[in-house]
Image (cartoon, rainbow, N blue to C red):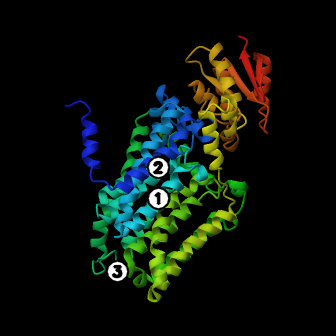
């Protein structure tokens, strides 16, 4: 094989790409470049990389260490190892996602103008820090797979579509709803261009889309069944515990189902689906628009699933929202198409209402790039640059440096608090299965953690006095068996005496 054969292959594949697409890919690179120099500061990234470190050290996810998402994100974090490489993988992934979106939009619009315009907006919405676009989260990875899944669906390559959607589902559960949109489009009476086929023929035609979706998940269950004692923990952590999580924001787990916001959002979704069914002949005159519209409706439901106002949840809706918006100007100009224009506004209004109702927050954009420029030009010290992201960032780096100075490599630690960065930065794993205190509290696993610590006491315990909830039994154990040797802000460092 020739040296750099893969580079020749890339050149062959990309030589016919349009100049605007190449420019957009360069913009993605520029927008994301500062993210490669960010410190560890974002909590969820700390969890992902801690679990990834656990995988690298031979532990089994869920059985030996806990989080409540499917495994693909943690495996990817294990490949990355550090926040730099995690962000670098994300940069490359989002460039690929941009190409996929560009190709998908070409399926919906023949003119190049809406394709270029919509892809440009897509790049800025997904790569700016406004909606946490520069931070590595599951949404960044599954939106690219969902876009590919819809693309293959339009190509009537149902096996590929189902398998890719199934892989997206293994990053996080909301892609289930994007997939359901494709299923409903397929089975509506009059079909997707095949109205006279009987139901059994339609089932046979779409069966690969269904089977393909479940194959990746089935394979993970087989994998964990082959690991001693791992299957139950996989089922409980990655799937079963997600059900109460979806309605736990603001204490909603204590309410009856008709007072739960998820219930009422389901009612709204059902009303929309009934309306679509009753007006199916109307919608099927504009089949591509209908697909985009239904995709957007289900993506909104997926993004609002937990009622949590985290900006990266909104990344799920960007692609279908832009496609729907791309149709609206042409519908508005023609009176006979005005009904489609009004139909397209419905999910847009629902999305806007949900954004304000759930109080979604956003991140600063101009200040983000100013902070990086000042640091890169030597106008800002490293400590100030780090603490711009979070006031505790520099402190956490000091704690990790202290731990690594006095603790041999391979030793586990335990942190009571919500600072998983301490594990990820020091490349250590916790004693017990939990990386953050809020998981221990949410699932009431204090005794499990205390048993793990007393059975295999770590050399170092970090106790966060700033965390609003204390762990009294752990404090009793620390006072009997440990000595506080250092303190960084609210973080106390306890060292085992014997």
Closer to the camera: disc 3 or disc 2?
A: 2
Q: Which residue is mark 2?
A: 27
**Near-viewer residue (491 or 411):** 491
Element at label 2? helix
- As drawn, 386 above or below 72: above
Crowd band around label 1 with a 10 angstrom C-alpha radius: few (<14), some (14–19), many (20+): many
The residue drawn where x is 69% and y is 36% is 418
As drawn, is 486 to the left or to the right of 257?
Answer: right
Residue at the disc numbered 1: 120
- Camera-nearest residue between 147 and 409: 147
Q: Secondary structure at mark 1?
A: helix
Residue 190 is marked as: 3
Q: Secondary structure at mark 3?
A: loop
**Relative image position of residue 370 (x, y in whole percent):** 63, 43
- Please name the residue shown 59% across and 34% down the image: 376
| Number of other residues with Cα within 10 Å of mark 3, as a class: few under 14, some 14 to 19, many 20 or more | some
Residue 144 left/right relative to 439: left
Indicate the quadrant containing the N terminus: top left, top right, bottom left or bottom right. Answer: top left
Tell me which residue sits at (49%, 45%) in the image: 30
Locate the C terminus by quadrant: top right
Q: Is residue 492 above or below residue 87?
A: above
Identify the mark nearer the N-term, 3 or 2.
Answer: 2
Looking at the picture, how far across and down is residue 442, in whole percent? 68, 44
Q: Nearer the viewer, residue 309 or 130?
A: 130
Residue 443 % position (x, y):
66, 43
For marks 2 and 1 on the same chain, the one whose residue lies earlier in the sequence: 2
């Amino acid at each position: 094989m020739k040296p750099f054969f893969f580079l020749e292959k890339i050149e062959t594949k990309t030589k016919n790409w349009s100049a605007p697409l190449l420019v957009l890919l360069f913009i993605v690179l520029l927008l994301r470049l500062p993210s490669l120099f960010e410190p560890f500061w974002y909590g969820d990234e700390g969890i992902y990389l801690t679990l990834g470190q656990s995988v690298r050290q031979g532990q089994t996810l869920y059985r030996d260490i806990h989080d409540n998402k499917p495994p693909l994100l943690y495996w990817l974090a294990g490949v990355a190892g550090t926040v730099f490489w995690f962000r670098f993988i994300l940069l490359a992934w989002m460039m690929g996602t941009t190409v996929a979106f560009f190709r998908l939009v070409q399926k919906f619009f023949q003119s190049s103008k809406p394709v270029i315009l919509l892809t440009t907006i897509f790049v800025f919405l997904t790569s700016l820090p406004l909606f946490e676009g520069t931070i590595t989260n599951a949404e960044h990875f599954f939106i690219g797979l969902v876009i590919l899944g819809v693309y293959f669906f339009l190509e009537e390559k149902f096996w590929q579509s189902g398998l890719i959607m199934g892989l997206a589902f293994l990053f996080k559960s909301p892609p289930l709803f994007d997939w359901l949109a494709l299923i409903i489009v397929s089975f509506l009476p009059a079909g997707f261009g095949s109205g006279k086929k009987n139901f059994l023929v339609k089932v046979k035609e779409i069966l690969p889309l269904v089977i393909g979706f479940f194959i990746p998940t089935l394979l993970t269950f087989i994998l964990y069944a082959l690991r001693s004692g791992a299957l139950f923990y996989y089922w409980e952590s990655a799937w079963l515990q997600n059900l109460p999580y979806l309605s736990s924001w603001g204490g909603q787990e204590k309410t009856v189902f008709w007072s739960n916001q998820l219930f009422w959002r389901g009612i709204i979704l059902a009303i929309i689906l009934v309306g679509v069914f009753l007006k199916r002949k109307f919608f099927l005159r504009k089949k591509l628009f209908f697909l985009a519209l239904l995709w957007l409706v289900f993506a909104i439901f997926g993004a609002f699933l937990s009622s949590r106002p985290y900006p990266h949840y909104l990344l799920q809706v960007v692609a279908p929202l832009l496609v729907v918006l791309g149709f609206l100007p042409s519908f508005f100009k023609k009176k006979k198409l005005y009904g489609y224009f009004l139909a397209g506004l419905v999910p847009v209004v629902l999305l806007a209402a949900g954004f304000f109702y759930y109080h979604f927050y956003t991140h600063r954009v101009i200040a983000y790039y100013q902070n990086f420029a000042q640091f890169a030009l030597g106008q800002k010290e490293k400590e100030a640059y780090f603490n711009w992201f979070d006031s505790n960032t520099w402190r956490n780096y000091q704690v990790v440096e202290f731990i690594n100075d006095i603790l041999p490599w391979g030793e586990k630690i335990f942190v009571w608090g919500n600072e998983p960065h301490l594990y990820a930065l020091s490349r250590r794993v916790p004693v017990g299965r939990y990386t953050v205190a809020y998981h221990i509290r949410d699932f009431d696993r204090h005794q499990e953690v205390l048993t793990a610590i007393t059975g295999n006491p770590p050399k170092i315990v970090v106790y966060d006095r700033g965390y609003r909830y204390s762990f009294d039994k752990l404090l009793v154990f620390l006072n009997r068996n440990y000595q506080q040797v250092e303190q960084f802000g609210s973080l106390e460092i306890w060292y085992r005496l014997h």
